[in-house]
């Protein structure tokens, strides 16, 4: 196949002249593909395990559907992702990283490490997104430590969040996690009331859980010793290798008794 006059290609990856830096430098050519607005965050979501369009939007609530579709098409044309039909007869499509896309994982991770180290200062009000915070929490629950058959419900109330996004429920049923914005109607095992800024700071490693509790930024109906998550972003700050950072959560539940949901390795 011949090359169009306004494109350059290498191994099937095309770069439009209109988007080009006009340099043969490999950094410039790679940036044309992966450094456009929203693209690094789309890659972050794909690397985190979001494959469906709506799941990608949940992790990127401020991107428009049309722009997300455009960026996914660009990544597909570049051979970084591939579009597949839904598994087991499910409607819709899934987006998966190709081998070349997977190789971007350490780069995105290192970008996060750099951000944790050098992008300093308190989070601004416009950066405190309760939807993104709860979505990130829900997908990092350590499900293997829950019963194979059973249900566990955590209720969150985020003070300082917009009224329509203050209440959230995490439902872990048969080791599957659902995030709800309306009450699921189940018995609550643990209720957590938290200042959204403080909880975001804890999640990002900028504040300890102990400090948040001491200053009454976080309250719970049970004894919360830490966070029931693995691979929290705070791992980037404390462990540059990128391996999981596990913090402790001990929940006293009427149905399960004393239960460790996550443990320090």
Image: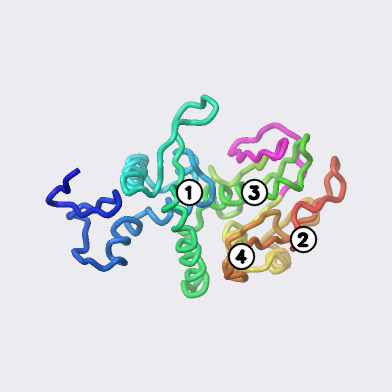
- Tell whether position 182 is magenta: yes
From the image, tell me which residue sits under label 4.
235
Badge 2 density bin: few <14, some 14–19, many ≥20, Cα 10 Å: some
The alpha-carbon separation of the residues under discs 3 and 4 comes to 25 Å
From the image, tell me which residue sits under label 1.
46
Q: Position of residue 35 (x, y in %)?
A: 34, 59
Which element carries disc 1, helix, strand or loop?
Answer: helix
In this rendered view, identify the residue nearer to me: 63 or 239.
239
Q: Which residue range is magenta in the image?
A: 172-191
Residue 238, compared with residue 65, is above or below; it is below
Q: Position of residue 36 (x, y in %)?
A: 32, 56
Q: Quadrant of the N terminus?
A: top left
Q: Please name the residue shown 17% across and 48% down the image.
A: 3
- Tell whether position 179 is magenta: yes
From the image, tell me which residue sits under label 3.
157
Q: Please name the residue shown 61% across and 67% down the image.
A: 205
In the displayed image of the protein, which residue is found farthest to the front? 1
Badge 4 density bin: few <14, some 14–19, many ≥20, Cα 10 Å: many
Which element carries disc 3, helix, strand or loop?
Answer: strand
Residue 163 located left or right of residue 77: right
Residue 178, compared with residue 11, is above or below; it is above
Q: Which mark is on residue 225? A: 2
Residue 238, compared with residue 232, is above or below; it is below
Foreground tag (4 vs 1): 1
In the displayed image of the protein, which residue is found farthest to the top? 89
Badge 3 density bin: few <14, some 14–19, many ≥20, Cα 10 Å: some
Residues at badges 3 and 4 in contact (C-beta under 8 Å)?
no
The alpha-carbon separation of the residues under discs 3 and 1 comes to 28 Å
Q: Which mark is on residue 106? A: none
């Amino acid at each position: 196949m011949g090359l169009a006059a306004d494109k350059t290609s290498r191994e099937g990856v095309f770069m439009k002249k209109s988007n080009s830096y006009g340099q043969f430098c490999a950094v410039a050519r790679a940036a044309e593909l992966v450094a456009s607005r929203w693209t690094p965050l789309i890659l972050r979501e794909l690397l985190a395990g979001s494959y469906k369009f709506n799941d990608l939007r949940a992790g990127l609530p401020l991107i428009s559907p049309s722009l997300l579709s455009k960026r996914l098409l660009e990544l597909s044309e570049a051979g970084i992702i591939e579009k597949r039909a839904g598994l087991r007869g499910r409607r819709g499509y899934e987006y998966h990283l190709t081998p070349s896309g997977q190789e971007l994982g350490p780069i995105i991770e290192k970008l996060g490490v750099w951000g944790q180290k050098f992008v300093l200062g308190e989070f601004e009000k416009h950066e405190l997104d309760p939807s993104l915070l709860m979505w990130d929490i829900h997908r990092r629950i350590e499900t293997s430590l829950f019963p194979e058959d059973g249900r566990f419900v955590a209720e969150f109330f985020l003070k300082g969040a917009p009224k329509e996004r203050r209440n959230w429920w995490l439902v872990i049923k048969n080791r599957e996690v659902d995030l709800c914005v309306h009450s699921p109607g189940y018995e609550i095992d643990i209720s957590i009331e938290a200042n959204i800024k403080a909880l975001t700071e804890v999640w990002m490693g900028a504040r300890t859980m102990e400090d948040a509790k001491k200053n009454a930024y976080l309250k719970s109906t049970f004894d919360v010793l830490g966070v029931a998550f693995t691979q929290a972003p705070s791992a980037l700050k404390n462990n540059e290798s990128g391996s999981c950072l596990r913090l402790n959560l001990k929940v006293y539940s009427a149905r399960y008794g004393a239960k460790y949901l996550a443990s320090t390795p």
